[in-house]
């Protein structure tokens, strides 16, 4: 009898100790980002929700999306926020990985910018337009130029798009292909640059300064990505819940900085004006 009571007491002590330890040592959550607004919106409205549940967030910043995706796949970090679904699918196809987007996040659209021109009139033949050199984002840039009536392009799979998909160059422009993050720097040399929203924001460009912004569709709204095998883990569910929380939505809507961003459908409106 004494042994049974002693065993029960020891077991109770272990349970209490475990609970106590869980409260004393918050679960660390490692999240990766590339240059852009996503880390700030995470700190603004997502981190407070996670901290309520006992998480401690550690931030990792990468130069490129390739590095950020590799870190998630290898398990070096738990999630990243920096890419849209089309880019993610392309990355998985090329690298034989299994990352998935589990929630969309507020995303600034790609736009056409210039330091050399105040309008789009009287452009001389041969003017230059810097565009991303990766196929997926090159296609987005070409769609912008097509909307302006400057070029006509043929339909192609996003992963296969090249400058050769321009079948008609109506204004005699010259495309300059650059690594995505170099877009803002290209403004010093090129007449125009089609710059992905996160890199424009990072370079202190305002969305309102763009001559035209892309008509962003859901596949191009950025997502929080995790490994497919971990998408049902508690931390992944808690991340989704934090993004979808009323407090996160209020935080984004109350900041003028996010004006012009395309918002996920859980906001109830797809544009922040």
Image (spheres, rainbow, N blue to C red):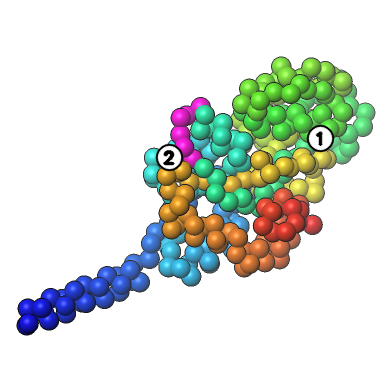
Q: Label for residue 162?
A: none
Q: Position of residue 71 (x, y in %)?
A: 43, 41
Q: Which region shows up in magenta? A: 94-99
In the picture shown, does residue 190 fall above or below 217?
above
* 110 with respect to 160 (left or right): right
Q: Is residue 211 magenta?
A: no
Structural distance between the alpha carbons of marks 2 and 1: 42 Å
Of circles 2 and 1, the one toward us is: 2
Mark 2 Cα shell of 10 Å, populated few (<14), some (14-19), many (≥20): some
Which residue extends farthest front? 1
In the picture shown, does residue 50 fall above or below 119?
below
* Res. 245 image quadrant: bottom right
Picture quarter with the C terminus = bottom right
Which residue extends farthest right? 122
At x 67%, y 66%, the residue is: 250
Element at label 2: helix
Element at label 1: loop
Mark 1, residue position = 116
Mark 2, residue position = 73
* 76 with respect to 67 (left or right): left
Q: Position of residue 131 (x, y in %)?
A: 70, 29
* 112 with respect to 244 (left or right): right
In the picture shown, does residue 107 fall above or below 51?
above
At x 43%, y 63%, the residue is: 56
At x 60%, y 60%, the residue is: 244
Q: Position of residue 178 (x, y in %)?
A: 64, 28
In the picture shown, does residue 9 fall above or below 217?
below
């Amino acid at each position: 009898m004494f042994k049974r009571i002693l065993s029960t007491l020891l077991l109770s002590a272990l349970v209490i100790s475990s609970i106590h330890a869980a409260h004393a040592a918050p679960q660390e959550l490692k999240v990766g980002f590339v240059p852009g607004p996503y880390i700030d919106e995470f700190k603004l409205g997502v981190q407070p929700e996670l901290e309520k549940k006992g998480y401690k967030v550690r931030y990792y910043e990468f130069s490129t999306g390739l590095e950020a995706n590799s870190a998630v796949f290898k398990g070096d970090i738990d999630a990243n926020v920096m890419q849209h679904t089309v880019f993610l699918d392309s990355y998985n196809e090329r690298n034989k990985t299994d990352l998935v987007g589990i929630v969309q996040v507020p995303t600034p659209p790609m736009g056409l910018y210039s330091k050399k021109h105040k309008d789009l009139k009287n452009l001389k033949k041969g003017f230059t337009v810097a565009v991303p050199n990766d196929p997926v984002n090159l296609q987005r840039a070409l769609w912008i130029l097509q909307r302006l009536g400057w070029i006509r392009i043929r339909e192609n799979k996003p992963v296969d798009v090249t400058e050769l998909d321009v079948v008609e160059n109506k204004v005699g422009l010259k495309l300059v292909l650059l690594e995505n993050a170099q877009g803002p720097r290209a403004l010093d040399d090129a007449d125009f640059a089609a710059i992905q929203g996160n890199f424009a924001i990072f370079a202190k460009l305002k969305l309102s300064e763009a001559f035209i912004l892309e008509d962003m569709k859901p596949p191009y709204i950025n997502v929080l990505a995790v490994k497919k095998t971990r998408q049902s883990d508690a931390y992944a569910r808690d991340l989704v819940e934090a993004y979808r929380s009323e407090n996160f939505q209020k935080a984004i809507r109350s900041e003028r900085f996010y004006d012009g961003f395309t918002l996920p459908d859980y906001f109830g409106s797809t544009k922040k004006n």
